[in-house]
Image: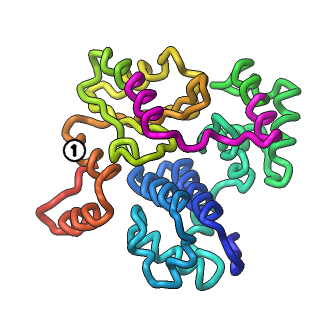
Amino acid sequence: MLHSRGFMTNQQIAQLLKNVAAAYTIQNANRFKILAYDKAADSIEHLTHEVKDIWNQGKLNQIPGIGPSIASHLDELFRTGQVKHFDSVMGKIPKSIYPLLELTGFGPKKAAKLVTTLKLEKSSSIIDDLTKAANLGKIAQIEGFGEKSQEDILESINAYKKGRSKQKRMPLPYAYALAEEVVSYLRRSKDVLKVTPLGSLRRMVSTIGDIDLAVSTNNPQKVVDYFLSYPQKGEIVEKGPEGATILLVNGQQIDMRVIKPKAWGSMLQYFTGSKYHNIKLREFALKPEYQLQA
């Protein structure tokens, strides 16, 4: 599937890793594995040097968010032009799903449901085929969608065709203020024990992509339902037992993950801590008397 002996930009490599994460999401893989790929993609997307140059210097392991496994896959990509593991993972879902992930408001499972239900198999014409299906009213008939979702999808397609993609990174002050509004809302729920930002916002880096929030709770479904009722919600991108993703009316994406109290620390550490700390913890977890809680 992947053949790229030529030069690949950081953006292209980041998109490749995002597609792998999307394939894992659709296959209900371990969420830590999914987020490892998302984290790596985010890191590569915002590097100031080309990954290929860093690879030539033998320093892939110095890129934040790139663990040994992903580093080995990137090494294979640069050496051979393809990654057998990526081919295997991504080949398990229809190719036509991947272009839909470029549309605003589309998560992996939403894209997969549309592709499989409507039997849209051609990736080269997926956008036009989905537009046709929407105009014929076929999307509104799918369980979990409806007329409003169909209208939103048409708007997303029109925006995409005009060259407006998903929201870019936000300055830290703006992202922090936006996150505080959502955090304040979540704290009003009696089922929310703790809530805090994850990732780049928790690390307070200068620019932020999507806002990621962690919630500790003993009632995950109630918290997910409460989150989906956020007043500034524009539309639901993804929802499930472990969290949900919404698109605000201003176009920004908010990802919320729920976790039981006993695993709270592990979640914060994994999604915010340094790569080397994560590696060391996993080394400890390999010992019989230890277990890395998820």
Where residue 112 appears, as percent x and y from the top left, is 66, 44
Q: Which range of residues does the magenta coloring cover?
A: 155-182
Where residue 163 appears, as percent x and y from the top left, is 78, 43
Count of numbered labels shown in the rendering:
1
Q: Residue at x 84, y 35 (%)?
A: 131
Q: Residue at x 22, y 62 (%)?
A: 281
Q: Is residue 80 magenta?
A: no
Q: Which residue is mark 1?
A: 265
Where residue 293 appears, as percent x and y from the top left, is 23, 50
On the image, which quarter does residue 16 sit in? Answer: bottom right
Q: Residue at x 39, y 74 (%)?
A: 61
Where residue 183 appears, as percent x and y from the top left, is 36, 25
User: In the rendered view, would you say 180 is above or below 14?
Assistant: above
Q: Is residue 181 magenta?
A: yes
Q: Residue at x 27, y 28 (%)?
A: 217
Q: Is residue 240 visible?
A: no
How packed mark 1 is, by other alpha carbons closer than 10 Å (few <14, some 14-19, many 20 or more), is few
Q: Mark 1 belongs to which amino acid?
A: Gly
Q: In terms of secondary structure, what is the magenta stretch mainly?
A: helix
Q: What quarter of the picture does the N terminus occupy?
A: bottom right
